[in-house]
Amino acid sequence: MKLGDVELDREPAFKLESKVRVRKKIRNDGTFPGKQVGETLANKGDEGYIISIGTYLQTAYIYSVHFLETNNVVGCLGKELELVTEN
């Protein structure tokens, strides 16, 4: 995605109930209740399932990912996720 692109002009990259993997460590930016700013919410490689899809700043999709191991539901941008394919 280039600067100025509006991701919402396309279909979401992931579907509900898709199994996804985090591509980088996700830290609390202050929007996750009960955790300190900067605290780790998900580590690179953690896997979870998309439970809802919303929008962020009217330009991007935000995917709510439920990480079963921690029971956290974390909002992630598409560029922070990759689809897990079952073999």
Image (cartoon, rainbow, N blue to C red):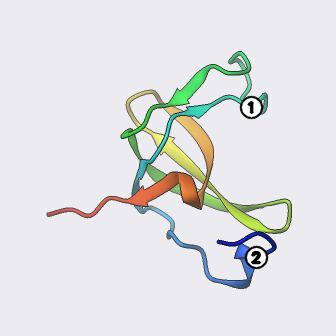
Q: Secondary structure at mark 2?
A: loop
Counting from the top left corner in percent of width and height, residue 18 is at 42, 62
Who comes first in sequence, dot 2 or dot 1?
Answer: 2
Q: Which residue is mark 2?
A: 5
Relative to 75, is 86 on the left or the right? left
Q: Amino acid at mark 2?
A: Asp
Q: Is residue 44 rendered to the left or right of residue 61?
A: left
Q: Tell me if mark 2 has few (under 14), some (14-19) or many (20+) residues whose alpha carbon lies within 10 angstroms of its own.
A: few
Please provide percent x and percent y for residue 1.
64, 71
Q: Are marks 2 and 1 in contact (CB under 8 Å)?
A: no
Q: Residue at x 49, y 41 (%)?
A: 24
Q: Residue at x 32, y 59 (%)?
A: 84
Residue type, mark 1 in image: Asp
Q: What is the crowding at mark 1: few (fewer than 14 residues within 10 Å), some, or many (at least 20)?
A: few
Name the spot of residue 73 as percent of width and height, x first. 57, 39
- Residue under circle 1? 29
The residues tagged by marks 2 and 1 sit, at their Cα atoms, a distance apart of 23 Å
SS for callout 1: loop
Q: Of the residues tagged 2 and 1, which is closer to the observer?
A: 2
Q: Residue furthest left?
A: 87
